[in-house]
Amino acid sequence: MSGAIATPSGNLPRLMMRGICKSFPGVQALSAVDFDLLPGEVHAIIGQNGAGKTTLVKIISGAYPADAGQIFINGQEVHFHSPADARKQGIMTVHQDWNLFPELSVAENIFAGRMPVKTQSGIIDWERCYEEAAKELRSLGLDLDPRMRVGLLRPAQMQMVEIVRCICANAAIMILDEPTAALGPHEIESLFAMIRCVVAGGVSILYISHKLEEVQEIADRVTVLRDGCKVGTVRADGVSRLDLIRMMVGREVEAPQKQVVVTPGAEILRLHQVGRGRSLRDISFSLRSGEILGIFGLLGAGQKQLIDVLYGITPADTGEIWVNGRKVRIESPEMAKRLGLGLVPGDRKREGLVQTLSASANLTLANTALISFANLFLSPRRERTQSWHWINALDIRPKDGSRLVKYFSGGNQQKVVLGKWLQNNCKVLILDHPTQGVDVGAKSEIYALLEELAKANMGIILVSTELPEILAMSDRILVMRNGTIAAEIPRQEATNERLLAHATGEG
Amino acid sequence: MSDGIVAFEPVAAQQESCPPMEEPRPRGWVAWTETPIIGLLLILIALFLVFSLTAPTFLTFRNMAILAGSISMIGIVAAAMTLVIIGGNLDLSVAATIALTSMVVANLLVGLQWGELASVGAGILVGLIVGVLNGLLVARLGINSVIATLATYSIARWGAYLLGTKGRSIPLGYAEERPFFDSIGQGNLFGVPVPFLIMVVILTAIWFFLAHTRFGREFLAVGGNPLAALLTGISVRRYTFFAFTLTGLCSGICGVIFASRLAGGYPGGAMGWELDIITAVFLGGTSLTGGQGSILGTFLGVVIIGTLRNGMALLGIDITAQNIATGSVLLLAMLYDRLRRGGAEL
């Protein structure tokens, strides 16, 4: 690493980290990482899962102590023993799961713990509270009623409220961890507008994301981590996306390739005017074996409800479902599994994996009969053979099935979830945002795998809010809006603009 | 320094400075932080040392037989309670069920003059029914297990009082010969108390279920992450129901042993045992957050609680102080558990 760290404007970095090391049992999470954050800059940290982004951020925010290295704030060396220490220095984290109070108003959330009070009586000065909140919201270009209950806001608005809260608490450094994970394209735009506003006020932003296009749009500089080491820091406008990917993976990665179009086989799933409550209406479509059906829509367009109905989590109240030509009523996930359906859920950690079990136990969980004899007794030998087969077939790393699944990286965990359904030999695989929070390398592996599965005559339903993924992978695309199907578009006619137009109702 | 790219070094040079990822540590070696067994054994050895030095009658064959008999009743229920707790629930109704079962058995034997086998069978059935009821309340209706079993606790306990005239206990008397019934609680087989053998059989069966059957594997998944298990097509309800039913069944078996050992039905019997049982399970390293539990740990927990009570009784420490000691043991166990998992901030 070259001795002095150059700064574009030459001024003193607000945050300076030198030689940060951190190890966990069995893993060197960070080795000798240097990092600078200038006043009023958006600095993105990118890297594959397991590259050390989260660890670095946790050290900055005081959640972990570093094993070695120094941290300077405005040139002064600091030692954080807890997140509270970091907060005192103005370092605030906007988490993926917003820690707001849903039952309280926007203003109460913004001033939580520091409500303005009347000087004589010491009781809360509500008028001033709402007034000041409105002022803060306006100054960041937000058109929100400060009296509104936060629980009623959309996810994007909640996140913005949290950002306002940090600003009001005199944040000097704000950490945004995957802030666009749950946002639609328009919401991302308004979030970026707000970030530019915040930065103009002199606050520094540390931006963590998997999405390179976003990073290039919003960040001034980008630091790339790989395997716990810093690969380099580059100006965001001086580097191509391919270069960034190269830095992240250290090898060439193909962008999602257009797959070979397979001729779909027999119809294996058909929905006819399926609905549930008011959130899902009049859904009709069919799926053939060997076909990848993309379901696109902005967040909250009813995709979640469709998955729940298909998979029996909340059964449909109207309409008919056919599986393999037989009319069925799917009342539980257990029944869905028996019909040959599989689900790769959107929230891997919460919904996909049992963290207290090993990778091999998770891999074989959907069909424990296959690893038993007499349909009752577990056979360690069969479990090893089965899980070893899928660990190799899916290239899950490390190749150690006896390791608890929580010690695997995001991409490998996702492969375990996928492997679970392949092991059960499912016929229809439903995937909910299968590449969310998955690094670039694992992403293309998952895409390649989906193509393989389609070739092997599996019917695949790919639910995603990410346009490139939907466009690259799907044979046919359903666009959802307001709980129903707004359009069905064959792949030849699918374009960014058309899909977005249907999804937003301008088509 | 030029503008533009700031510190973009060749990738190959960087890679050299990266230490290789460490291989996972060899198998077979278990750190103390990963299992409570070592700690439990140390506690047990310490208790045995203290009591054999202070109470001369502690380390006698006679006292060991008494100890084995008395821990077996707790142990039988604790084995099943381990499953309930792995599933993230609690069952507070067990001790009341033991008392109710003892009253039913005594009533049938003395009042209705039923045969031994029929009375024992009916007693176990009573426990099973309470278990099924708990299972339905928690798994079917989704009622919080603490609330649900608090309700069945009251019903079973006061039901037991109703069965005795004016709430009195029912002594069996010694007029009649009841060889089978008496042997359940008081008999010896190869010099080992029968209740102890029953406990060993039940503990082994549940251990085998958890470690070596596919349903045990699915059960662990349900305990570890009910949502993920559900989405993997595993019936969470069925396993929750199973755990409560089994606990009811074991409480019934324990109630029969109780009636046999104490030769009667006691509506106020087994008072507070649910605390000893739950303490033993927690002590054994099973956590309420679910998914993790050890039958061997539960067994050691039961032995520790039993030894503590037995030793203190020999030293003439009264029941009040014993209960305080048991509570303190639970607290210490929780503290140790926090330290072991590295979560304690004192």
Image (tube, rainbow, N blue to C red):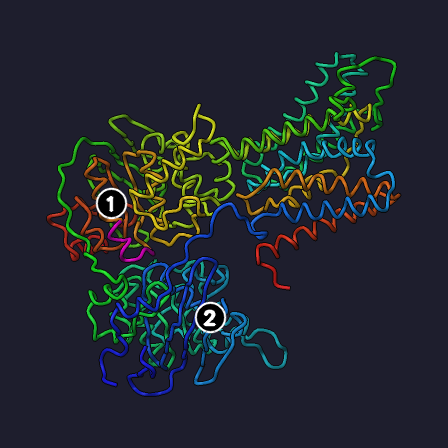
For the C terminus of chain A, give its image quadrant.
Answer: bottom left
Q: Secondary structure at mark 1?
A: helix
Q: Residues within 10 Å of mark 2 (few under 14, many from 20)?
A: many
| Mark positioned earlier in the residue sequence (1 or 2) | 2
Q: Position of residue A81 (x, y in %)?
A: 54, 72
Using the image, tell me which numbered label, if any, was put on residue A61: 2
Measuring 57% from the left and 53% from the top, which residue is drawn there?
A: B33
What's the chain of the residue with tag 1?
A: A
> A241 left or right of A73?
left
Q: Position of residue B242 (x, y in %)?
A: 55, 31
For the N terminus of chain A, give its image quadrant.
Answer: bottom left
- Asked if residue A438 lies in the magenta stretch, the reply is yes
Stretch in magenta? A437-445
Q: Amino acid at mark 1?
A: Leu
What's the chain of the residue with tag 2?
A: A
Seen in the picture, residue A18 relative to A335 is either above or below; the reply is below
> B138 left or right of A140?
right
- Whether residue A276 is visible to the viewer of this picture, yes or no, is no
Check disc 1 and report the residue beneath it: A449
Of marks 1 and 2, the one in the foreground: 1
Q: Secondary structure at mark 2?
A: loop
Identity of the residue furthest to the left in this view: A492
Seen in the picture, residue B45 relative to B14 is either above or below; the reply is above
Measuring 18% from the left and 30% from the top, which residue is drawn there?
A: A266
Q: Amino acid at mark 2?
A: Ser
Q: Position of residue B343 (x, y in %)?
A: 58, 58
- Whether residue A53 is visible to the viewer of this picture, yes or no, is yes
Residue A422, located in which quarter of the rendered image? top left
